[in-house]
Amino acid sequence: MLEDRTAAASSPTAWPTAYPQGYAVVDVETTGLARDDRIISAAVYRLDALGEVEDHWYTLVNPERDPGPVWIHGLTSEALEGAPLFTDIAEEFSARLDSRVLVAHNAVFDWQMIAREYARAEREAPVRQRLCTIALSKELGLPLPNHKLESLAAHFGVIQQRAHHALDDARVLAEAFRPSLRAAAAGRVRLPLQECLPLTEWRDTSAPRIGQQAGGRGGYSAYSSYRPTSWRPSRKRPACPYPNPGRYEEGGRLKQGMRIAFSGDTSIERDLLEDRAIEAGLHVATSLSRLTSLLVTNDPDSSTSKVVKARQYGTPVVDEAAFGQLLRDVEPASQQ
């Protein structure tokens, strides 16, 4: 029984020594889902190595722009106007995250939003690893109807009081994470930890200033198809004009037309990296197949679907730094 396994795992002597020593369960509410959107509230529950709550913290954040879907998060321009800027709360936020694994539901979204805010503030978040509770529930084989937070909460009997309120969402996740962590420990399950890289190069675009929000449920196009588990909206790119010359060979040059896939965090924002690959005449693929020429990842030991498929297919793998060097000397298609 799950209850028996989690109870047994609560004993420190039964705990896997490779597990992290502390966690920061995080939830952020934002003005939207795009990369130029901003954080408007943030909450952190700090947990010890066994998943027990140490303390919690919550703050509003003035996004200096339109707050987006007020009908979802309930935070109006008036409520946010006197709130601190992200630069004002960055130090306290860092203290809450320091030396801990960031835990979130669809963690890539929360982490990327946080990383961009720190980049804007010319600071670096003290986070090196994250754990997505969606990925953990899959590792545990939990019988969930879907991957929504409410389904995970219901599975563990956690009562949600204010959905889409950062503090309550973080509380719910912390309470659901504890039994998940203990079940993983009892079964000696490898935690699906992912590397977190701070952004060193990124692009920002202008957005509506605070006080310019559209009224009504349909007034804000960026959230008109709100999906809590989405992050990177698809970008329509021109088709690569060159045929695929095959796989990259170690020690060789990239060739125009090669299919390149990316997985995991990059210190250069992904869209910028993809744009540079396309400008060099490469084909950026959103998925990995037997036709993929090269996978770029800074975490080759991770268990993402692309990394797993790359191992299965024998697809060559390089890290971001090596890829940057290769981009400097791409062989033209005419020389193939």
Image: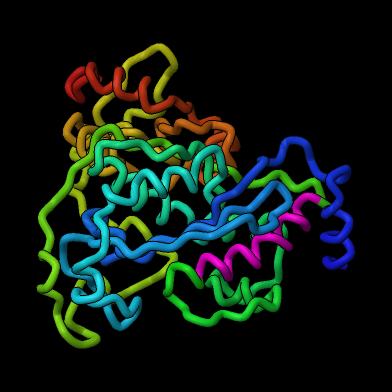
17 left or right, relative to 93: right
255 or 135: nearer the viewer: 135
> Which segment did they paint magenta?
169-185
Position in image of residue 83 (x %, y %): 26, 64
* Residue 15: quadrant of the picture: top right
Number of marks in the rendered image: 0
Instruction: Indicate whether residue 177 is drawn in magenta.
Output: yes
Q: Can the viewer see residue 126?
A: yes
205 or 170: nearer the viewer: 170
Image: 220 above or below 203:
below
76 or 252: nearer the viewer: 76
316 left or right, relative to 23: left
Image: 21 above or below 70:
above
Identified at 33% across, 65% down, the residue is 60
Position in image of residue 66 (x %, y %): 17, 69
306 left or right, relative to 175: left
261 left or right, relative to 105: left
